Image (cartoon, grey):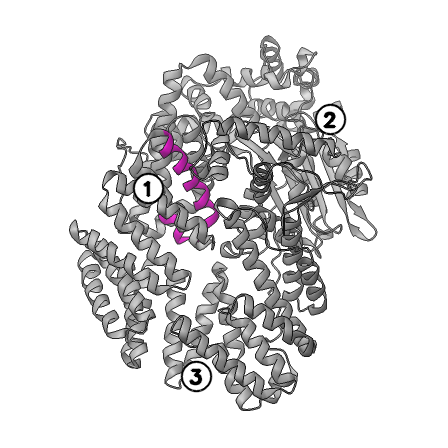
Amino acid sequence: MDPAQGTPAMRYRLLGPVEVRSPGGAPLALGTPMRVRLLAILMAQPGTAWSIDQLVDELWQGRQPKTAAGNVKTYIWALRRVLHSAGAPDPAIRAGATGYRLVLDAQALDSAAFDDLTQRGYHALHQDRCSDALRTFEAALALWRGEPFAGLPGCGVLLSVRTRLQEQRASLLEEVADLQLRIGRHNELIEPLRTQIDGDPLRERPWGQLMVALARAGRRADALTTYRKLHRLLADEVGVEPGPDLQHLHVRILRDDRELLTSGTRPAEKPAPRVVPRQLPAPPTLFAGRTSELAQLTTLLLADSGPAGTVVVTGTGGVGKTWLALRWAHDNLRHFPDGQLHVDLGGFGSSAQEASPSAVVVRSLLPALGVKPLEIPAEPAAQFALYRSLTADRRLLVLLDNARDAEQVRPLLPGSARCAVLVTSRHTLPGLVAAEGAHPVALDLPSTAEARQLLVRRLGTRRAATQPAAVDELISRTARLPLALSIVAARAAARPTFPLQAIADDLAASRGGLAALVTDDAATDLRTVLSWSYRLLSPAAARLFRQLSLHPAADISAAAAASLGGAPPHLIRPALDELTRANLLAEQSPNRFHCHDLLRAYGEELTDAHDSAADREAARKRVLDHYLRVAREAARLVDAGWQPVDPLPVPPDASSPAFADHRAALAWFGSEQRVLLATVDEAAAHGFDAHAGQLAQALTPMLSRLSQWHDLAAVQGTAVTVAQRSGHPLVEALAHRDLALAHIQLRRFRAAHHHLQRSMARCDQVGDRPGQASAHLHLAWLFDTEGDPRAALPHASQALALASSIDDRRGMAAALNGLGWGHARLDEYERAIAYCERALALYEEAEDRLGAAHTWDSLGFAHHGLGAHPTAADCYRRALALYAEVEDPCGRADTLVRLGDTHQAVGEHDTSVDLWRQALAILDRVGHPQAMVLSERLAAYR
């Protein structure tokens, strides 16, 4: 129901044939198949903007007519008319600067509802609330009416989303079967499991569930026959045996294991320790008054039963919204035992800094709630559903600061009425008030008494008492605006011998005002205060203040500021200190500064007025050169084999930090990650395409090492765009390859194949053999990850031939190791060892420790397969030592698991369990999906 109108909402359905139902429940006549297909594309990724060119590519897949762009616009017009005539209050298909997007409420789309229910079910399951989980899973499955997008061609985004949803449904059916086995529904499961197996006979888990169901139904012989059928099927189809879990289950049935016949196949999971986030910034030191507003917040957000509700604090820029929110939050911490979340949404900062809801959830909220990077779903709808699930039973305070509009806030509302949400915005957000029941609190200027109290706290009682008339005039001239008062107070406090009246006179002589804050009363013009502070700056500090508005983000390091200003660090530091003393900049931590968005806006006005376009472009280029130069150095330390493709020359700069080793490089990246991501976008927006593409290249090693796959996908998506725009096929090829890397890790296999094919095509176009070799290596990895090592081998062979033709020693080593691993996966162990030993010699010649670690791991796997367990263990230990040196936690965890397998094979059970536990601790820390599999294996040995 629409809370504002009291009528049912439109329903969009893609879990079956695509259809839209009116508020009354009637299906809409959407028109021609091409219209339906276009709507399906928009439904596949709701909220995502599609350009005309992208929609043409998706609709016609390279075979478009000359009128394709016009046809798309006609289809959009017709669809919007149909949807509007059915009762939608606003067009669901919205046009913007970046294209068309479908804007829907969270539960209007059946696939989003499916994701939401699925995440809620898993949340219940992790808390061992099996009945709740089963009911929720069954409700999710009931939304399906057939194959997603049934009747539409399977290509492009529709194929990708269809494949993902079908995989989610198959996994969910398996979870449901496990839960039904736990509660004794084995008899009624037998036929549905057989139907499920007929549809996808190579999924092993349903076979095991069917074996358990048959055994518990007293049909032990049928259970054993089922295992033999699976054994023959796997041998005939893919040449492998059933996995170790099924083999173990087979043995338990043969032994007539009583425990198997009376308990679930999976032990109840122990709930993970709950993370209690404490994200609030420090309370404001100059806060004064606001007694009635604080009391109003308490009334709205706290009740006898605990916290509840959403409050939107609104008011003009600089009126003290954030100060009020933080003061109240710190005063009421005891009411929120499950923690406090805080996000600056950047709604009124620079456009590069406005945070999308998905980025906020991925980079801030889910990690704060204990979700590891690899546990975060790939799709925004699933990300929001997981966030709501994790907050559903908590008493949290969520502070969403500096919001632009209701659409930015709505997906970030928690999943429980027991949480309190405090939003600050310069807009009134009527949509949030009407649809979500938020309570508005309009924040006006403080009273004269409160303004005086704020000044007295900064100036001191004695100084203020001796000059009361000057204090009154300062209050009047600053219009009691807290931000202006704080700037005036900083100015007066920094000059303790100045008469306050002199400062008031100087303020009175200044005119002007920020365009966004113009009022009818000149005394409330904030530009007067800011311009007055600016005019007192030294020329060097004034120039730097203007240039800071050109920086891609509100945060900046002293080194980056030096590059921006075009001066050595020792000469730029006095200007930074001067700006900090004047309250025009804040040093949040040593050598790291933050500029308030109002001040950045004022700086933009000043630089437009006083600096030439050439000067502004030169400043932007200097800071882009800085980040590119430092990121390249960091990339080389993190990945010894990394080299830029088609490198853009950048001049040397004394302000660039020097890194002692790869650990220092990763630490720098951790502090600058958000700035670097914004810098890629800013470079692309201002036409510095080469910088955007090159910086995206340099960020890949760091983002990969830290498993930041969502950010890698975003950065490389921008890199693909700028490379295509500027016509650089080599850079485009690399961007497609690195984008495919992110998609592989996020299990978006169709997208990975697409981008690797595009990468290969661009490399073929210019005869780039290193790029061709790399693309083949990534294709080999992709096929192996998909479970098809035989398909991977030809690509590894191609990579070896290409690398050998140009004497690329590292490329040859990687290809040889890939061949060795592939042959070992196919039980061809002698060939595998021969390839790996050649690879190892090349890696050691190049002093590439990470490559050598991968190869020692492959050798251990091959020797284990031959039964040479002592040799295998020695290889694994060599790999572990190298992984520790280069700080690759995931590589170390994989090798610990395989070393444990080797000890298990020789009967050293305690040692193997200890190694698996070490691996599990690492996988848990990085949020790797294999953690659950390893946890279940360990449970069997308790």
Q: Which residue is mark 3?
A: 909
Residues at discs 2 and 1 in contact (Cβ within 8 Å)? no
Answer whether residue 54 is magenta in the image.
no
Q: Nearer the viewer, mark 3 or mark 1?
A: 1
* Residue stretch in magenta: 701-725
Give the residue at the far bottom of this rendering. 255
Q: Amino acid under label 2?
A: Pro
Q: Which residue is mark 2?
A: 446
Q: Amino acid at mark 3?
A: His
Q: Nearer the viewer, residue 518 or 101?
A: 101
Question: Quarter of the image holding residue 73?
Answer: top right
Magenta stretch: dominant secondary structure? helix
Q: Label 1 is placed on what type of residue?
A: Ala
Residue 173 coordinates in the image, percent (x, y): 61, 65
**What secondary structure is found at the residue carrying circle 2?**
loop
Q: Position of residue 718 (x, y in %)?
A: 43, 37
Query: Mark 1 or mark 2, which is nearer the start of the sequence?
Result: 2
Q: Position of residue 820 (x, y in %)?
A: 27, 66
The answer to whether residue 454 is above or below residue 299 is: above
Residue contact between numbered discs 2 and 3, judged by CB atoms under 8 Å = no
Res. 733 mark: 1
**Residue at 46% of width from left, 21% of height from top?**
546
Percent from the top left, x then y, of residue 399? 66, 42
Q: Residue at x 54, y 35 (%)?
A: 49
What secondary structure is marked by label 3?
A: helix
Q: Spatial distance from mark 3 to mark 1, Cα to Cα? A: 48 Å
Rounded to the nearest angstrom, the CA distance separating label 2 from label 3 is: 70 Å
Residue 719 lies in magenta, yes or no?
Answer: yes
Label whose residue precedes the other's in the sequence (3 or 1): 1
